[in-house]
Amino acid sequence: MAKKVVLVNPGKNKPWASILPPMNLGYIASYLEKHGVEVYIVDELADQDVRKAFEHLQPEIVGITATTALAPDAYRVAKIARKLGFTTVMGGVHASFLTQEVLKHVDIVVKGEGEQAMLNIVRGSRSRIIKAPYIKNLDEIPPPSWHLMDMEFYLSASERFKGVHIDYVPAKSKLGSIMTIRGCPYSCIFCCNSWRDIPVRFHSPKRVVDDIEFLIERYRIQALYFAEDDFFMNKRRLKNICRLMQENNINLIWGCQARSNSIDLESLKMAKEAGCCQVQFGFESGSQRILDILKNKTTKVEKNAQAAKLCKQVGIRSFATFMLGNPTETVEDLKATIDFIKNNDIDRVGVLITTPFPGTKLWQWCQEHDLVPEKIDYSKLITHNVSIPANDTMPPKVINKFAREIRSYLHPVTFGEALREICSRPFLFYKAIKHPIETFTVLIGIGKPLKNKLLIGIGGRKKR
């Protein structure tokens, strides 16, 4: 049995990925600690040096997690660990789907959930591909090993990030995060849950509240974020969690994600009374045709509009994200999304470019339509601009232009803010020197972009 394990959260110089702590590694660590294993977490996103940690700790096994965008960082970490003679393991969605590719970089790939699989590896299993049964009762897994993480770094996320899904948290307030549900019953084509064969499971209400109380007592958190896909999924469970939070005098503001068809007036009122101040929705599109494609006809545009109204009615902020550049999407579909944003009182709007990721039905669709190149820079697979097109009806430049226009309409940027952004990002600074008018125009959203014919009729800007 291995005596020492180091788990790595890769991502050197990737601040955009460091909003929430690596809870996935925290759960694996706590499960290993429960079985007597010495474990450490090294977190590049929190600016920890993996090479120095490896040389100091001398682990027998290095376990690495990664989203697709961070896969190059994961491969770099694996290369360092292998040169030092450690057994390397990689898990996560990217490894689960692109197993043969990942095996070129590590000794063992874990497919699916990692707790039992890592324990099997620690106990001596050296199969190159390992998949362990999922844990049916989530309460059997101890809370994440928070003591192994740089909690001060993550508790201060509200100071480091503005304009994202945690902007309901006041500046300098300590933000805690927990995950109380695993899995999703839906199969949206852009989500990795579209291929998983693992059912939805829940932590019990008591366990949820116990975990919250620990974060309050140990780290003095003042705000909380529930990191699962749909916190409102199980109404009875939601009711019991809200009741226990009130009975235990938990005085926190909190936010979560939910689907619009999980929302009703009663559940929102319960959540509001228990401290909920923001619900995040993936409304995705104002076109029912596109919404049917993305979400397999499981929700309606009208239901999305109703969810925003109900949130407004009970005094909870709504934060909705929309996706541009979807399969078969046309300019008319994009205009329908613009109209939806204009005509519904949503408190905060995020505009994303639809991006295919390995392990999703969308990825498969893009492969079938010859949109996925042979060589891929995974680090480019972020949702701000078109990387791999997920649309075969419009050129990427049109999709990117729509995104810039909507963002500048929703979130006007001052000249000073644009200047600070340029100075803090070398590639923007270089571009500003070569093309100053164009660069400032895009960032601020003035001049030519607002005259774009695609957005005729959008009207004046709306303050958010």
Image: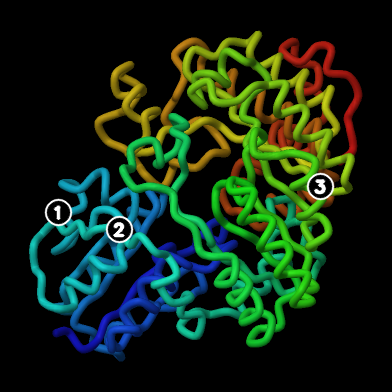
Which residue carries the number 3 mark?
A: 317
Which residue carries the number 2 mark?
A: 134
Query: Residue at the spot x=10%, y=76% of the render?
Result: 124
205 vs 457, left or right, is left
Q: Residue 375, relative to residue 405: is it above or below? A: below
Element type at mark 3: strand
133 vs 235, left or right, is left
In the figure, residue 459 lies in which quadrant? top right
Q: Label 2 vs label 1: CA separation?
A: 26 Å
Question: Is disc 1 surrounded by few (<14), some (14 to 19) or many (20+) residues within 10 Å?
Answer: few
Question: Amino acid under label 3?
Answer: Arg
x, y percent for residue 140: 39, 72
- In front of the other: 41 or 233: 233
Question: Is disc 3 surrounded by few (<14), some (14 to 19) or many (20+) residues within 10 Å?
Answer: many
Question: Amino acid under label 1?
Answer: Lys
Label 3–label 1 contact, CB within 8 A: no
* Mark 3 or mark 1, whichever is nearer to me: 3
* Mark 2 or mark 1, whichever is nearer to me: 2
In the figure, residue 44 lies in which quadrant? bottom left
In the figure, residue 284 lies in which quadrant? top right
Which residue carries the number 1 mark?
A: 104
